[in-house]
């Protein structure tokens, strides 16, 4: 993707303008899509995948502001520059409120247009480099299917490495969706039983009357429907690892039987009179507070202490938000390959939404959200609109809310500052004549800077 040329959409009902802009933009390193406008353009916008659009304000059938609105709906990541021979303060303000990057008057100031296109191209290149770096870092910081650069996750990975060769029973705790089964699989993979079976059982998904049969097996005729003898989970995992997810859902009567198996390594099938020896590493997981469950009499204290020889606690995603971008990069790469799409990442607005979402479902919820968003998109980048839709259209957190239209206008057109000629010359000299950099340093918009340059005869 680093060698991909950005795409400029030029929309104007004057063929001469299109031809002139097309020649200029290609020299600037852009591929160009030319269109005369109209309703057909609005229908085609979702499939165009443009990086920037140069749109005439006054056109028959569909106005430039209508095209701007359609582009913002179809691809919020696409930046829009409006152009017109009939400029007015009202139309400029409306364009800014709708999210236009800038507003050019005809005949063109090609230096200004070139500067805008250069800024767009350099911004896209920076974004692509950042996305590539995120994917590479996600791969580098992947550990047995888990991704984490944060200190808390690096510490977790180190604990797993040290415990895996030795631990025989362990308790993995954490909220729903934090990756407890991945921790169990990592302990199995890095331990001495990696060549044996890993058997997973979700205690919350087993009908209460079948718990004993599922875990310990049954003999033929042990109960109605038992037409054949069947080994239980412990026998299937003999020599390997048994993962008991949601152990807090296990009925009390079964907790006593489980304690005996863990203590003595013997199982007795339902309907059998003899016992069988098993050698199983038991890793249990729960999203409940088992200490509180013990206090309330819902979980056996002796079983809790037997399982809790080693406790591995997983942090919720909200406590390691610095990992979200790396997790997202890894998930997007997986889904792009699965769906056969050329998705390379997400827009800054989409990334802000993900970074500030509450994530009660943790990593699982993040993965599911990105899977939905990848299904929805036809572009190279997941947009803010697609991520918001995948989140269910939930209201954004206050810290993540984008600026309102009035705030955007205030940011783009700040209160006038009194700048004398010498200050302007000094700043321009310091930034090598780069007007965008000068505007940023002075804390004014580019439009405001141009007005001051004109006032002092420096333009």
Image (cartoon, rainbow, N blue to C red):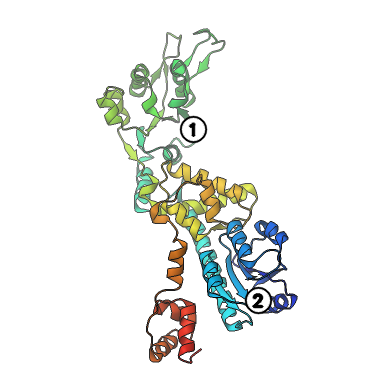
Dot 1: few (<14), some (14–19), or many (≥20) neighbours within 10 Å?
some
Task: Give the CA separation, mark 1 to mark 2.
Answer: 62 Å
Q: Is residue 27 above or below residue 405?
A: below
| 127 lies left or right of 416 | right
> In this figure, which residue is indicated by the disc labeled 2?
25
- Quadrant that contains the N terminus: bottom right
Residue 122 visible? The answer is no
Q: Residue 57: give x, y in percent of width and height.
A: 63, 71
Q: Residue 255: give x, y in percent of width and height.
A: 35, 20
Q: Residue at x 35, y 16 (%)?
A: 253
The nearer-to-camera label among 1 and 2 is 2
Residue 301 visible? The answer is yes
Q: Is residue 455 above or below residue 137?
A: below
Mark carried by residue 196: 1
Q: Residue at x 73, y 68 (%)?
A: 36
Mark carried by residue 259: none
Q: Residue 297: give x, y in percent of width and height.
A: 27, 22
Q: Is residue 146 above or below residue 306?
A: below
| 302 lies left or right of 226 | left
Q: Residue 231: give x, y in percent of width and height.
A: 50, 19
């Amino acid at each position: 993707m680093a060698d991909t040329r950005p795409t400029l959409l030029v929309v104007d009902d004057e063929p001469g303008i299109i031809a002139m802009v097309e020649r200029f933009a290609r020299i600037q390193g852009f591929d160009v899509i030319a269109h005369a406008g109209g309703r057909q353009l609005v229908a085609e916008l979702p499939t165009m995948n443009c990086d920037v659009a140069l749109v005439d304000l006054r056109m028959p059938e569909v106005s430039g502001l209508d095209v701007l609105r359609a582009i913002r709906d179809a691809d919020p990541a696409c930046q829009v520059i409006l152009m017109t021979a009939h400029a007015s303060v009202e139309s400029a303000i409306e364009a800014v409120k709708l999210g236009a990057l800038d507003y050019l008057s005809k005949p063109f100031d090609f230096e200004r247009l070139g500067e805008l296109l250069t800024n767009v191209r350099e911004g896209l290149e920076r974004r692509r480099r950042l996305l590539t770096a995120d994917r590479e870092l996600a791969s580098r910081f992947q550990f047995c299917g888990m991704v984490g650069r944060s200190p808390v996750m690096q510490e977790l990975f180190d604990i797993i490495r040290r415990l895996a060769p030795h631990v025989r029973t362990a308790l993995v705790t954490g909220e729903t969706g934090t990756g407890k089964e991945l921790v169990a699989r990592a302990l199995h993979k890095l331990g001495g039983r990696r060549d044996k079976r890993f058997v997973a059982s979700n205690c919350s998904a087993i009908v209460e009357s079948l718990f004993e049969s599922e875990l310990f097996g049954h003999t033929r005729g042990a109960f109605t429907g038992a037409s054949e003898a069947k080994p239980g989970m412990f026998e299937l995992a003999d020599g390997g690892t048994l993962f008991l997810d949601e152990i807090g859902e296990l009925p009390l009567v079964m907790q006593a039987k489980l304690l005996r198996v863990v203590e003595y390594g013997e199982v007795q099938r339902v309907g059998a009179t003899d016992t069988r020896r098993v050698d199983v590493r038991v890793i249990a997981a729960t999203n409940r507070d088992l200490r509180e469950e013990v206090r309330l009499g819902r979980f056996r204290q002796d079983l809790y202490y037997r399982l809790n020889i080693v406790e591995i606690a997983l942090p919720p995603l909200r406590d390691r938000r610095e990992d979200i971008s790396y997790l997202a990069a890894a998930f997007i790469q997986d889904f792009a390959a699965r769906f056969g799409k050329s998705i390379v990442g997400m827009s800054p607005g989409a990334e802000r939404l993900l970074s500030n979402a509450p994530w009660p479902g943790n990593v699982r919820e993040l993965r599911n959200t990105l899977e939905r968003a990848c299904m929805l998109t036809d572009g190279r980048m997941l947009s803010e609109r697609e991520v918001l839709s995948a989140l269910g259209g939930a209201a954004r957190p206050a810290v993540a809310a984008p600026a309102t239209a009035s705030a955007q206008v205030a940011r783009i057109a700040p209160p006038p500052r009194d700048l004398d000629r010498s200050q302007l010359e000094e700043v321009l000299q310091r930034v090598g004549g780069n007007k965008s950099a000068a505007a940023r340093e002075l804390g004014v918009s580019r439009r405001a800077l141009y007005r001051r340059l004109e006032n002092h005869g420096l333009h």
